[in-house]
Image (cartoon, coloured by chain):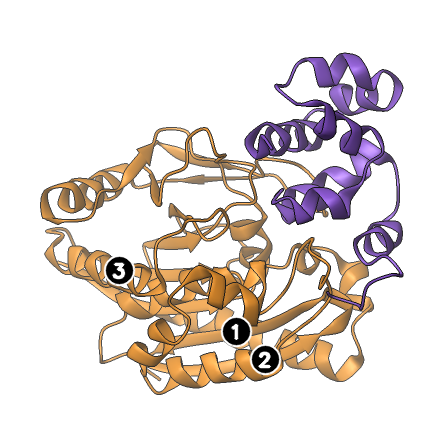
Amino acid sequence: MSRYQIDKLLRDLRRDGELAAHFRTDIETVLDSYKLDAEERDLLRRWEIRALYDRGVNPLLLLLAHGPAAGRSMQEYAAMMNPKDRQPGE
Amino acid sequence: MGKVVAGIACSHVPFMASPKQWERLPETERTHLRMGFERARKILEDARPDVLITFADDHFDRCFYDNLPAFLVGVGEEAIGPAVAGFDIPNVRLPIPSNLARFIVREGLEGGVDFAFSEELALDHAEIAPMMHLTPRWDVPIIPIVVNAFAPPMPTPRRCFDVGAFIGRCIERWPETTRVAFLGTGGLSHWVGPPQTGKINEQFDRWFLECLTHRRIDEATGRYARYEDLEAVAGNGGHEIRDWLAVAGAMPQRLHPEVLAYEPLKPWSTGTGIMAWSSE
């Protein structure tokens, strides 16, 4: 798991609106710019934030990138971080 | 000679920059927090500082894993912010007394604290949001110091206290007549991004405030010295107590600590506190 590369992508998505728009419309091209393996690409493609967190990705960066990258609300973020098959905060 | 004239430590939750976010708070909590900031503002005003030295951390907007100092001092001519727009944070521009900033860096490098320094260190919500309430006329020059309290591994809580104490002694050695106040921002307990996001540990917060009020520094810095232990009890945002400890370290005995406000603010998902060290 190249955690640094994922953290770097999240940082860039938070800071660069054009990159975030590109991420939403042509994700493969954006992912090609970072050194990611197939599993990481898949998690990012499906925006599996809980799985990324469980693999050590920085949660602050996940939160900051969530809106720009996924175009989803904070309520959705909280729900995705706490899936129903786990206890809250587990 | 320089003189340390006051210290403030407070939370820096970015919502405090937005009138709409203040309206979300229950009236009692909102009133307590406003009164706390008003008292802190008055303490700073009465202390008449020539410069405000800030200890604040970053949120990956100024530093990143490609280059991440433990203590980064802004030494340029001015500090401009915010580094990244958002949360109703206003644009600000403050002069830096760079001769004093460089003095601190040099004293550190020759005396045991390996400060990093920057000619273009931006301000961020960590400084600007609380300063909107503490120095609303933006008339006090600033020396911003960014403490790594956000990207592990980090300097220990004790190290942050000791670095603050070192800077306090630097001020006493500074040959010019300069009145210096300190501001540390962040915390108290909060979780930003992990599954526990929204949680507040009021018990931890009140324990920490009591430690600082009674100068129980060994306890405040020692109980959760490992960052994993502190994060478990106070959240990834709880690491920011390092900025409070740096202020506590810089304070001379003649300045008395007191808690001005504390509220576990659910709408802001943060244990929100304000402390002051003053001669009152």
Determine which of the numbered discs, if any, sits on residue B262 in the image.
Answer: 2
Q: Residues within 10 Å of mark 1 (few under 14, many from 20)?
A: many
Question: What is the three-letter code of the residue carrying label 3?
Answer: Arg
Q: Compare marks 2 and 1 and give the one earlier in the sequence.
A: 2
Q: Residues within 10 Å of mark 3 (few under 14, many from 20)?
A: some
Q: Which chain is orange?
A: B
Same chain check for tags 2 and 1? yes
Marks 2 and 1, how far apart in space?
Answer: 6 Å
Name the tint of chain A in the rendering. purple
Please report the residue visible at 42 percent of the width from the left and 75 percent of the height from the top: B276
Q: Secondary structure at mark 1?
A: strand
Residue at numbered disc 1: B274
Residue B225 visible = yes
Instruction: Chain letter for mark 1, please.
Output: B
Q: Secondary structure at mark 2?
A: strand
Callout 2 touching callout 1 (CB < 8 Å): yes
Query: Could you say where residue B85 lies in the image, as x and y percent from the top left?
Result: 67, 37
Query: Could you say where residue A13 lies in the image, as x and y percent from the top left?
Result: 71, 28
Query: In this rendering, is residue A6 above or below B30?
Result: above
Q: Nearer the viewer, residue B163 or B53?
A: B163
- Report whether A88 appears left or right of A3: right
Q: Compare marks 2 and 3 and give the one earlier in the sequence.
A: 3
Q: Quadrant of residue B247?
A: bottom left
Question: What is the three-letter code of the residue carrying label 1?
Answer: Ile
Q: Nearer the viewer, residue B137 or A33?
A: A33
Q: Quadrant of residue A19?
A: top right
Please report the residue visible at 65 percent of the width from the left and 27 percent of the height from the top: A9
Query: Could you say where residue A20 lies in the image, as x and y percent from the top left?
Result: 78, 25
